[in-house]
Image (cartoon, rainbow, N blue to C red):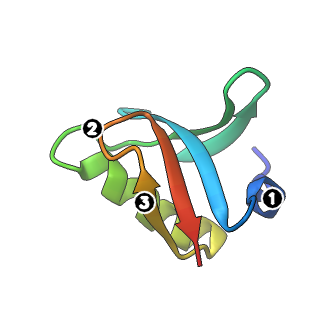
Amino acid sequence: MNKLDLNSYIKENKLELYIVPNAKENSIEFDKDRGLIAKIKAPPRENLANEEILKYLKKEYGLKVSLLKGQKSRLKVFSVQ
């Protein structure tokens, strides 16, 4: 699968992702109804999925981000530095 260019989805230094935890592998894809969907291997407990998506965005896309909104929600907004 080709890696998406996330730069085109960053608006005003913010990136919005819908998170799907407990996935087989980490990936990000586009869905016309939900927008960007991040499939993350980590479970949605004890902040594990949030930590996993932060690491994944840095490792795979070179993005340094912090979570702005959605600590306990599947819809998350990240600040991109």
Label number found at residue 67 = 3
Image: 20 above or below 49: above
At 67% from the left edge and 68% from the top edge, which residue is drawn?
13
Q: Residue at x 27, y 37 (%)?
A: 44
Q: Position of residue 32 (x, y in %)?
A: 79, 24
SS for callout 1: loop
* Mark closer to the chain start, 2 or 1: 1
Observer-side mark, 3 or 2, equals 3
Q: Is residue 19 visible?
A: yes
Category of crowding for the residue at label 2, using alpha-carbon neighbours closer than 10 angstroms: few (below 14), some (14–19), many (at least 20):
some
Locate the C terminus by quadrant: bottom right
Find numbered disc 2 in the image and state the secondary structure of the residue it sits on. Answer: loop
Examine the rendered structure and indicate whether residue 56 appears above or below residue 49: below
| Residue at x 43% of width, y 50% of height | 69
- Residue 62 percent across, percent down from the top left: 62, 76
* Most distant residue in the top direction: 33
**SS type, badge 3:** strand
| Residue hosting label 1 | 5
The type of residue carrying mark 2 is: Pro
Residue 33 against residue 65 in the figure, above or below: above
